[in-house]
Amino acid sequence: MTATKHSAEAFLVVDPQQDYEESDTTWGVYGSLQAAKIATPRLRRHRLIHWNTDRDTEIQRWRGDQLIGTWTYHGNPDSALHGTWTYEEHP
């Protein structure tokens, strides 16, 4: 079913597949982009203890069952908290 303007909107913080042996892992579901962006560094800090901090983390914007856009946090190998964001809109 196609999403409508009345469909619920959610922002998922996701550790995306970055190797052929991996699958996506959802770390949290939020009601706003701001809440998801605030939570992302904390989630990365707790989840990436044993992984490389240069891994990407995504915030996916969903409306109903339709992916609207993705913000990708590109990690910094020197710090789990300092990286850059990029945005990709999904038609």
Image (tube, rainbow, N blue to C red):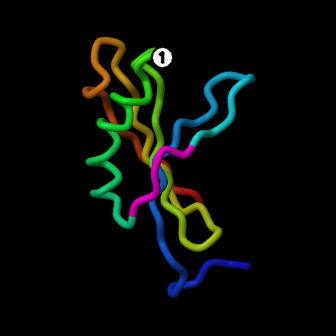
The residue that appears at 38% across and 67% down in the rendered structure is: 31
Q: Quadrant of residue 18?
A: top right
Residue furthest top as drawn: 78
Q: Is residue 11 magenta?
A: no
How busy is the neighbourhood of tag 1: few (under 14 within 10 Å), some, or many (20 plus)?
few
Q: Is residue 33 left or right of residue 5?
A: left
Q: Amino acid at mark 1?
A: Trp
Q: How many marks?
A: 1
Helix or strand or loop: what does disc 1 sit on? loop
84 left or right, relative to 25: left
* Towards the viewer: 37 or 43: 43
**Residue 90: which quarter of the image?**
bottom right
Residue 44 to residue 20: above or below: below
Locate residue 60, reporting x and y percent: 50, 53
Q: Residue furthest bottom?
A: 6
**Magenta span contains residue 28:** yes
Look at the image and give the residue range highlighted in magenta: 26-30
Q: Could you say where residue 32 lies in the image, as x and y percent from the top left?
A: 34, 64
Q: Which secondary structure is most common in the magenta stretch?
A: strand
